[in-house]
Image (cartoon, grey):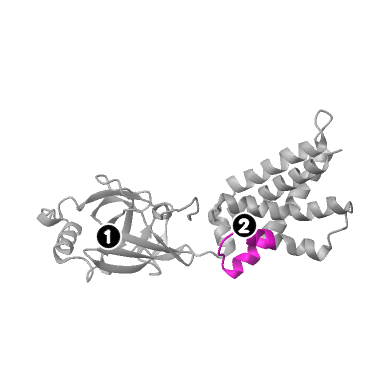
Amino acid sequence: MINAVGTLAMSYIMDWSLLRVTIVLLDRRIRLWRLVLGSVVGTLPTLWVLLTQNLYAVPWEMMMIWPALVVIVAVEKLPWRLWIKAYVIFIAMTILAGGIALVVLTWIPHNWLPSWLLVGLTVPVVLWLIGRFVPHQRIRQYLGESQHGEVRLVLAEKMLTVRCLWDSGNRMRDPVLRRPVIVLEVNQAIEWLPENVLAWVSSFLAGKHDPVPEDWRGRLGTVRYQSIGGQGILPVVALDRAQGRFQGRWFPLVPVTLALTNVNVSADRSYFALVSPDCIVTLNQEGVGA
């Protein structure tokens, strides 16, 4: 037999695991204190049962609503459609956890270990593995999450806002400053780039190698790229600062370098820049990523 404290501990571990895998499958990150608080809220029905010593003390309607409350407490600022999907994922993972527990109790010999401890060790591990190895890109497609956003680029006190793709495959870095590289179509920046910078970039893209303007030394350079379509070298300029809009919110970006290309980065013209989600600044262990 497992005592009341052990039952609460088991409930807490299960709710922690279910919340974590739900958040991972939503492709979100969660603050630790919210995960702790959500897991505590999840144990309250178990506490209710223990205090009343009645397995049916919690009405079934309450049991159906409670997971939604747990997710709301644990997750901050989701669009309404994602609240619904988070609830569905949490319920689905709960059912899956029950199935895993049933398989463990039915097929795994547990003479050497109490059944409650075997379930308490096995189910969280399986849920962690699901969150670790399920491909997030497929999950984003299922959730209807757009990988498109916008970036605000600031150079010489002028701002340019363009649509972008949050491209986790963009791992380029400026070889000198070691900054992440944003790739932008040069035709989007003609009116925005300073004249001498635009002249140097245009010359480079045309196959010429003019000297870097004196007042931009240390800010202009080149970066080598390699993609499915081939490889080559692009001109780059170090930006003053940048911001990115990801999933409806604006975030500051780390110091970045802008690479300019004369080819289209999007076949359907739905975006004009490629930005790694790693550029987004994360605060208080809460961040985003694609």
Percent coordinates x, y for residue 120 in the rendering: 74, 40
> Considering the numbered disc 1 on the image, is that residue within a helix, a strand or a loop?
strand
Label the magenta part by its dominant secondary structure: helix
Residue denoted by label 2? 74
Of tags 2 and 1, the one toward the viewer is 2
Query: Which amino acid type is marked by label 1?
Result: Thr
Percent coordinates x, y for residue 73 in the rendering: 63, 60
Q: Quadrant of the N terminus?
A: top right
Percent coordinates x, y for residue 145 in the rendering: 53, 64
Residue denoted by label 1? 261
**Magenta stretch bounds:** 69-87
Residue plotted at (12% across, 56% down) = 215
Q: Is residue 85 magenta?
A: yes
Query: Which amino acid type is marked by label 2?
Result: Ala
Residue plotted at (28% across, 63% down) = 154
Question: As drawn, is 33 to the left or to the right of 286?
Answer: right
Front-most of residues 130 and 268: 130
Question: As drawn, is 167 to the left or to the right of 180?
Answer: right
